[in-house]
Structure formats: C-alpha cells, structure tokens
Amino acid sequence: MTDDPKDRALSVADQLRARAARGPITDAQRKLLEHSAKIFDEPVRAKDAAFMPRELVQVTLPHKNPGDVPVWRRTNGNCTVVMQPGWNIEKNESFGYPYGIIPRLLLFWITTEAVQKKSRRLELGNSLAGFIAELGLDPQRGGKRSDARRLRDQMEWLFRARMSFQGSFERSGQCGAARLDMQVADKTELWWNRRDPNQTALWGSWIELGERFFAAITAFPVPADMRALRALKRSPLALDLYAWLSYEAWKAHKTGKLQFENWEQLHAHLGAEYKHLNNFRTHAKAALRKIKTVYPGLKLGDRQGGIQVLPESWPSIRPRNITTINGTCKAV
C-alpha cells in the first residue's frame, strides 16, 4: 500500500471489487461499490461539490425521533446546540423535530445552494419528484414511508425549528459566553402535491433562509462530495462521521498537525442516541469502513482509542476543485 492518499483509497475500492467477485452481495453493497468506482475513477465535477455548515458538523442533529420533549440539545466540548420545534397553529401542537438522513441531505443541499448562489432565497422547483431526485432520494417509492411524504414532513420540521448555538470561551484570563439564536427559514412557499410528486405546479416552490442562519452557514462551509453523500445516505451516523472527517482532514492538511478524538468525545457529539459506548463504537467503525470506500483523500493513523486523521489527508473535494479564501474553502 502506497503513502499517496488516492492510491490508498483506490486499494480499498479494489478490495470491494474483489469482494464482489467472490460471490453474491447485497443491493446496498452493490450500490456502494458503484458509487465507489465512480468516485475513484471519474474526476470531480463542479456539480459534485457540496457544503455543510461547520456548526452542524461539530454538533449534529438527532439520529432518531426525540419524541414529545420541549427541548433537544447536544454538546461538543464548549459548543452546544439547543433546538425547539415550531408550533402548528392548525393542530395547536408542536411540529416534530428534524431527525435522520433527510434533514442532513437537506442541509447539505441548502448550504451548497446558499454558498454557490450567494442568496437567502433558494428555488426548489415546480416538481416535488424533481427535488426528491436532486437530493438522491427515490420519488417513486410509495406508501406511508414514501420519500415524498418523509421529505415534506422533515422540511416542515426543519424549517420551523428554532436553533440556538451556545458556547463558552476564555480570553486574556477572562471567561465569557456567546450564543446565536436563529431559524432555518423565515419564509416558505411550497406548491407541491404530496399525493402526486410528479405533478408539476404552476408556480415554483421556494424558501428564504433566516438572515442569521444564512450568515452562519456561509461563513465557514465544510466541503464535501455529493456522490459520497448519496452513497452514505442510508445512515445518519455515516453522514455525520463523513462530514466530521471532511472537516478534520481539512484542518489536518492546512495546519500540518494530526487531528484526534477519542471514542468518548465522538460518542458525545456524533452518537449520543447510542446509550452504550461500545455499541456506538461498533456502529461507527462499520460506518468508517464505508466512508473509506468513498473518500479518496482520507488517511488515518493507527492510534488506538479513537480516530486519528493524518496531515497527509486531503479534503473530501480535491484541491484542484476548491480554493481557500480568507481561510474558507470555496468551490471553483
């Protein structure tokens, strides 16, 4: 195995191909293999560049439905995100919390559009089916668990939720605290037909991001490969771990210093829904094996007790596809 990150990643892809040659594989394994081959064999195109807000890489959304609780929170070091659901005036009850894979894919899409278009108003199109496909979901899946139904629900919950980022800091021997309260979208106009996702509306649907949320997600967007996100979309933990590794790889590459978090730290801000650390570690290692197959530039150390990202790593979007402006990665 060579020291070049791309060669190392390619060897992982070759291992998957060898696994496929040994006998039958599951549909999920086959799709992962297909995504892997494209990422390793084809150059990244501009439309493959995606972004995630740094704040929601450091502290992530719920993996599972938190249920009927007034407040949900997650902490990573001195940074805490607190979320409250919006209020449904028609039913006189709160909306649900955004959780699982769909709000994560939505946030990737929202941040990418905001960074590239430099606008708070984002056009969603005239067709629900078209938007579902753009997120890498299946517009043809029907029933109560259809992607159309789940997407509409999660959009409502995400756009209505109120988020607060709170943190503590020390400067010149003095301790302080800071917070940022915001809502994802201040305005929405959705004309889609939930029962018939393929129906084209006369008017286009759109959202307008909250001013503070827009400022936060465009201040320091973390680059990601949309093809990898689609390959990992079955697991919220895999998406969170991929986004975190993209951020850590960028820091390691920029500073020349390895990055390390132990399993207890990772459990706190990536997998608090797992009650037992050993259970989280098992699932995280399984997710990590998948991430390695779709992340050519990732190079990990062999330090035990956590995940170590080496300075030889590249960001998830290779340097020829990004540029750094005032310390921030931008697609070019």
Image (cartoon, rainbow, N blue to C red):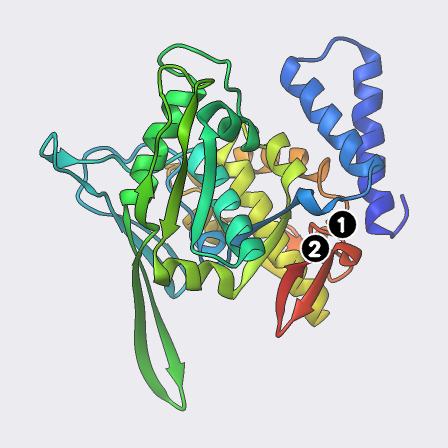
Compared to 70, does 15 lie above or below? above
Quadrant holding the C terminus: bottom right
- Viewer-nearest residue: 38 or 100: 38
List x then y, in percent, for residue 2.
90, 48
Q: Determine the image quadrant of residue 202.
A: top left
Instruction: Identify the secondary structure beneath mark 1.
Output: loop
Query: Given the image, on which type of amino acid does mark 2 rest?
Result: Pro
Q: Give the residue number, with chain letter if any, for mark 2.
A: 315
Q: Give the residue number, with chain letter if any, for mark 1.
A: 297
Compared to 314, does 145 lie above or below? above
Quadrant holding the N terminus: top right
C-alpha gap between disc 1 and disc 2: 6 Å
232 left or right of 219 in image:
right
The residue positioned 38% from the left and 25% from the top of the image is 150
The residue positioned 45% from the left and 47% from the top of the image is 122
Query: Given the image, on which type of amino acid does mark 1 rest?
Result: Gly
- Viewer-nearest residue: 311 or 49: 49
List x then y, in percent, for residue 83.
28, 49
Compared to 44, does 99 lie above or below? above
The residue positioned 85% from the left and 30% from the top of the image is 14
Tags 1 and 2 in contact by the CB under 8 Å rule? yes
- Viewer-nearest residue: 224 or 312: 224
Compared to 21, does 212 lie above or below? below
